[in-house]
């Protein structure tokens, strides 16, 4: 193993330097500038007034009324709560839809398995915007669902089911967007599962429900947790689904932040919201790291 | 007789009734919307939702739409600049991280690579917008290229790292034993063996760059519109068969590259 000894520190630093520069300047740099902007005062002309102020963060909870008094404003809190609920619901639905599929795929022959997993990953590599707006054709006024209702005489021409611009439409969009991210980690943990455990349990008179509850679920827990995080985190900051399927009426955190920069032009408030979202995500990731460590310790004890 | 019984019983144990059908519904859910979108792009009607007949009319119309062509060219310029940059950075980083043994900045550097995956896209988008605006950097497409390079790095890195880890270090040691110097070992052994991994990384970075929407939407100023941003502005004005046609082409392109990547990787693994 002399090769590692030959590689001098200088070489390593030289080959890592481009990474440090690019991510350091263009990823960490922007996050720091955003943190600074979130602590500034907003300028009526849509820019930033260079004066320290917590108004960006205060605006999340409070509003200034006509008499210059500060009063509690739950509007943004409602948006945060809605984002949370929809992200949770999307994660749960993805788990419900994805878990049996992941299990079924993991029990196929190697050849079939590879093809099916490839089919699961394809949507992930295609354009999310396009995949989401396909749902407008399905859910929209006069879309696929409404015209088939028309065809069977369940709905007359003039009326509409009003499927679009609802929380359910956003929810469908979110599940559709991130479902592959739930299936892949669950599949990975199921693939490694020792099938003899299922045989042994059956020999000991376990029924199917017990097999799932006592063997398959606990053994695929790392995958379930990993998949849930991979779905929950992007749902929390989603922009495309609430924008296209919620029609901008039902704002979520992601679309609220985007709105502050494209229309409202209140940068400090937008930056404060983005910092808030980032903090939430970091909390989720720390929670995940803790869970993973616990799982590893538990596995090592065995 | 008894063994046969046991066998069927075991197969019975692994398989749960209804899971197969559920998986079929799962794949239907994933693919039917895409299928419908593509079908409607061949609709001859001016109204996206009403089917009147099969036609290539909207595809033909794309070729006379200058805005779409400019946006497509922009998308390709960005992807052909950002993907190679990200791949080069990812290759050097992978070499240092996989072959460099234990050293001080190891954890820190791996953390830096995964950072773009951890931060929500909308946060990266907004932060990059503020960053460029407050520094007064307004270079049109170059801003977009820089932003794309950053988030393409982790995607280029993954296959390259995997290829390096799968490579037998003894091959390099053997070359060194036979009096090959470091540079020529790298050139004749490491690099050729790593090329499939590097190409895979490039393909993934390319697809990610071509498909990106949110970050481009925020970072791109006027004149730097890419195809997804243009499609967004079209969708906002109402779904038309023309949008379906461009979108179908984009989907086909991404699926083509990813399928290429898949066959390519399967060949390496065999």
Image (cartoon, rainbow, N blue to C red):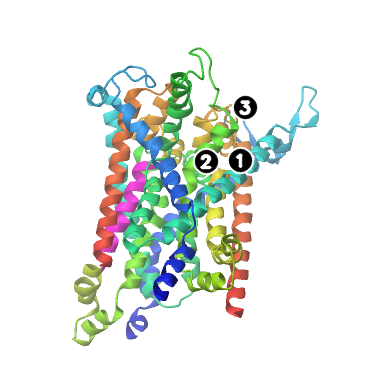
- Up-down relation of residue A245 to residue B47 (above or below): below
Task: Quickly name the residue at label 2.
Answer: A174
Mark 2, Cα crowd under 10 Å, few <14 / some 14-19 / many 20+, is many
> Badge 1 is on which residue?
A86
CA gap between label 2 and label 1 equals: 8 Å
Which residue is pictured at 35% across the width and 63% down the height? A109
Q: Is residue A239 above or below residue B82?
A: above
Q: Is residue B156 above or below residue A301?
A: above
Which residue is the site of mark 3? A44
Quadrant in which residue A48 is drawn? top right
Chain letter for the residue marked with disc 2 in the picture: A
Q: CA distance from mark 2 to mark 3?
A: 35 Å
Image-based side of A190 in relation to B44, left or right:
right
Name the residue rendered at 28%, 61% in the picture: B198
Front-most of residues A111 and A50: A111
User: Residue at position x 42%, y 75% from top?
Assistant: B2
Q: Secondary structure at mark 3?
A: loop
Q: Secondary structure under badge 2? A: helix
Residue A55 point in image, percent of width and height: 70, 37
Image-based side of A271 in relation to B16, left or right: right
Spatial separation of the CA atoms under disc 1 and disc 3: 33 Å
Please tell me whether mark 1 or mark 3 is closer to you in this view.
Answer: 1
Do the residues bearing badges 2 and 1 touch, measured as CB atoms within 8 Å? yes
Q: Confirm or deny contact between disc 2 and disc 3 (CB under 8 A).
A: no
The stretch in magenta equals B194-212
Q: Position of residue B26 (x, y in %)?
A: 45, 46
Q: SS for tag 1?
A: helix
Q: A276 left or right of A96?
A: right
Position in image of residue B204 (x %, y %)? 33, 52
Is residue A191 in the magenta section?
Answer: no
Marker count (numbered) = 3
Q: Are marks 2 and 1 on the same chain?
A: yes
């Amino acid at each position: 193993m002399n090769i590692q000894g030959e590689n001098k520190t200088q070489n390593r630093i030289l080959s890592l330097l481009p990474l440090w520069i690019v991510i350091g300047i263009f990823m960490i740099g922007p996050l720091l500038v955003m943190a600074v902007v979130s602590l500034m005062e907003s300028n009526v002309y849509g820019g930033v007034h260079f004066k320290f102020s917590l108004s960006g963060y205060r605006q999340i909870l409070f509003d200034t009324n006509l008499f210059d008094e500060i009063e509690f404003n739950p509007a943004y809190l409602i948006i945060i709560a809605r984002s949370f609920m929809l992200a949770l619901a999307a994660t749960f639905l993805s788990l419900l839809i994805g878990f049996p599929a992941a299990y079924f795929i993991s029990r196929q022959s190697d050849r079939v398995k590879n093809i099916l997993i490839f089919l699961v990953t394809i949507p992930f590599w295609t354009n999310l915007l396009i995949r989401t707006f396909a749902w407008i054709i399905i859910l929209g006024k006069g879309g696929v669902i409404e015209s088939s209702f028309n065809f069977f005489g369940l709905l007359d021409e003039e009326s509409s089911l009003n499927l679009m611009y609802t929380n359910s439409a956003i929810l469908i969009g979110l599940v559709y967007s991130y479902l592959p991210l739930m299936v892949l980690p669950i599949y990975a943990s199921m693939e490694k599962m020792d099938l003899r455990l299922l045989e042994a349990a059956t020999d000991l008179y376990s029924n199917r429900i017990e097999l799932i509850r006592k063997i398959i679920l606990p053994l695929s827990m790392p995958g379930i947790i990993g998949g849930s995080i991979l779905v929950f985190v992007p749902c929390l900051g989603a922009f495309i689904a609430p924008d296209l399927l919620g029609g901008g009426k039902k704002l979520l955190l992601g679309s609220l932040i985007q709105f502050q920069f494209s229309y409202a032009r209140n940068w400090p408030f937008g930056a404060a919201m983005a910092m808030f979202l980032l903090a939430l995500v970091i909390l989720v990731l720390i929670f995940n790291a803790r869970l993973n460590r616990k799982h590893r310790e538990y596995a090592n004890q065995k | 007789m008894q063994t046969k019984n046991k066998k069927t019983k075991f197969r019975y144990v692994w398989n749960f009734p209804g899971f197969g059908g559920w998986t079929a519904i799962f794949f239907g859910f994933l693919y039917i919307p895409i299928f419908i979108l593509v079908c409607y792009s061949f609709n001859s009607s001016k109204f996206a939702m009403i089917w009147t007949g099969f036609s290539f009319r909207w595809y033909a119309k794309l070729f006379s739409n200058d805005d779409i062509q400019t946006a497509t060219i922009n998308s390709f310029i960005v992807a052909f600049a950002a993907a190679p940059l990200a791949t080069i950075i990812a290759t050097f980083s992978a070499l240092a991280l996989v072959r460099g043994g234990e050293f001080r900045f190891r954890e820190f550097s791996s953390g830096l690579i995964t950072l773009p995956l951890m931060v929500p896209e909308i946060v990266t988008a907004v932060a990059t917008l503020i960053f460029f605006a407050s520094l007064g950097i307004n270079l049109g497409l170059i801003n977009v290229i820089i932003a794309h390079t950053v988030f393409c790095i982790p995607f280029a890195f993954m296959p390259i790292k995997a290829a390096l880890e799968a490579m037998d270090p003894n091959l390099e040691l053997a070359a060194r034993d036979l009096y090959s110097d470091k540079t020529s070992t790298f050139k004749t052994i490491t690099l050729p063996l790593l090329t499939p991994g590097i190409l895979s990384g490039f393909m993934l970075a390319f697809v990610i760059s071509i498909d990106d929407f949110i970050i481009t939407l925020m970072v791109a100023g006027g004149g730097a519109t890419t195809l997804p941003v243009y499609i967004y502005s079209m969708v906002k004005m109402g779904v038309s068969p023309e949008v379906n046609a461009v979108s179908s082409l984009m989907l086909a392109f991404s699926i083509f590259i990813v399928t290429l990547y898949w066959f390519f990787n399967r060949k390496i693994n065999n």
